[in-house]
Amino acid sequence: MEIREGAVEIEVPEQESEGVDDAVFFNPVQELNRDLTVATLRAYRDREPRASSYLDAMAASGIRGVRAAADGWEATLCDTDPDAVALCKRNLARNDLDGETAQRDVNALLHEELYDVVDIDPFGTPIPFADAAFANVRNLVCVTATDTAPLCGAHFHSGVRKYSAIPRNTEYHGEIGMRILLSALARTAARYDVGVTPLFSHATNHYVRTYLELDHRATDANETIEEIGHIHHCEDCLHREHEHGLIAHPPETCPACEGNRVLTAGPIWLGATSESAFVVRVGDHVTDDMGTAETARELTATIAAELDRPTHYDQHRLCRQWGVTAIGMDDFLDRLRAAGYGASRTHFGGTTFKTEASVAEIRAAALDDG
Ligand SMILES: C[S@@+](CC[C@H](N)C(=O)[O-])C[C@H]1O[C@@H](n2cnc3c(N)ncnc32)[C@H](O)[C@@H]1O
């Protein structure tokens, strides 16, 4: 079957037909992820014009690498599966594009060749590929993680094993998952004296995606580690606070309600998960030939406007807690701002928001009974 994505035409395996269990992988639902990848690569080239080589590390049909090649990147499409590599070759040829292919374990390839940008898009966790990527890539590491249950704390032990961190299944679990992933990636990079700056990160129910710019000095790695710490979350009143540092000092009781059900998550990334100005550029590089252009523009606009805070709230969850009726989000945020607090929506959900106000301050500012 042929599909068109962005400026290219791609042969992909038939979907949902019987007997194709070992067919080359293709997921049409990831089109948003791929459109944003193309826009991010464009924005990154504005930022770092010397970056030219792009490794599609787990290429499958090659759709990412072909789209990158169509945008002028020197693309290499790698996969362990010979059928995938054959399909990658056909898809490059179908679009009259130059590009290398490699039937290799990408961990081996990364130790032999240098790339400016590598895109890690595996089944499940990216952790088995993180060491080779951070040890060898020059500029940018793009990572997808589809194992959201371990990341978010829903599969607790799996999360602890994979990410060497304690995740917690709070009402902001999507953000916990993103930050647990960033923490594990940052700590891996630091082992190679590499510092990371998250330029753009987004999360859905199905995956977390992040783009990390690399700086290759030990001092950069030290600065990266300073962005790591812990979140203490009260299950009784939803108060939360964070502390920087690799050692956690959880309060014995909640400082807000004195309850004793305080959960600690970490080591977790407490720094910015995106660079607002860069995300604006990504949105500018979304083009009308992209099937998800409208969603991609909305998502980048929301993320660019998100306050830089390590957790977010959900108005409906808070209102349930307080036994009151929720109001429209615009009114709710206006009330917080009128009380002097910063407030923004988030991309984690339609009723979610970020603010520096505490739970008690939110209640006082935003509710008529406050
Ligand atoms: C989720 S699919 C990639 C999807 C593709 N990037 C896309 O956007 O449609 C994961 C691919 O990784 C390949 N793979 C798994 N382990 C690998 C390894 N160690 N090195 C290279 N490729 C690998 C699999 O064969 C599979 O084709």
Image (tube, rainbow, N blue to C red):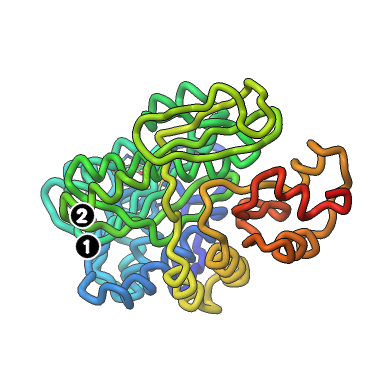
Ligand 1 is found in which quarter of the picture? top left
Q: Nearer the viewer, residue 315 or 369?
A: 369
Q: Which residue is mark 1?
A: 116
Kindly identify the residue that appears in the image at 45 percent across and 52 percent down. 209
Dot 2 beta carbon under 8 Å from ligand 1 = no
Circle 2 packing at 10 Å, graded few (<14), some (14-19), many (20+), is many
Is 12 rendered above or below residue 319?
below
* Mark 2 element type: loop
Q: Nearer the viewer, residue 91 or 157?
A: 157
Q: Nearer the viewer, residue 22 or 72?
A: 72
Spot occupied by residue 357 in the image (x, y as percentages of width and height): 64, 51
Indicate the amino acid at tag 2.
Val
* Mark 1 element type: loop
Kindly identify the residue that appears in the image at 88 percent across and 49 percent down. 369
Kindly identify the residue that appears in the image at 30 percent across and 59 percent down. 213
Kindly identify the residue that appears in the image at 45 percent across and 25 percent down. 158
Q: Quadrant of residue 149?
A: top right
Dot 1 beta carbon under 8 Å from ligand 1 = no
Real-space Cα separation, disc 2 to disc 1, in angstroms = 6 Å
Is 129 rendered above or below residue 263?
below
Indicate the amino acid at tag 1.
Asp
Query: Taking 104 as reference, is 327 left or right?
Result: right
- Say whether marks 2 and 1 touch (CB < 8 Å): yes
Spot occupied by residue 351 in the image (x, y as percentages of width and height): 73, 53
Spot occupied by residue 159 in the image (x, y as percentages of width and height): 45, 28
Q: Which residue is mark 2?
A: 137
> Which numbered circle lies on residue 302?
none
Is 106 rendered above or below residue 277?
above
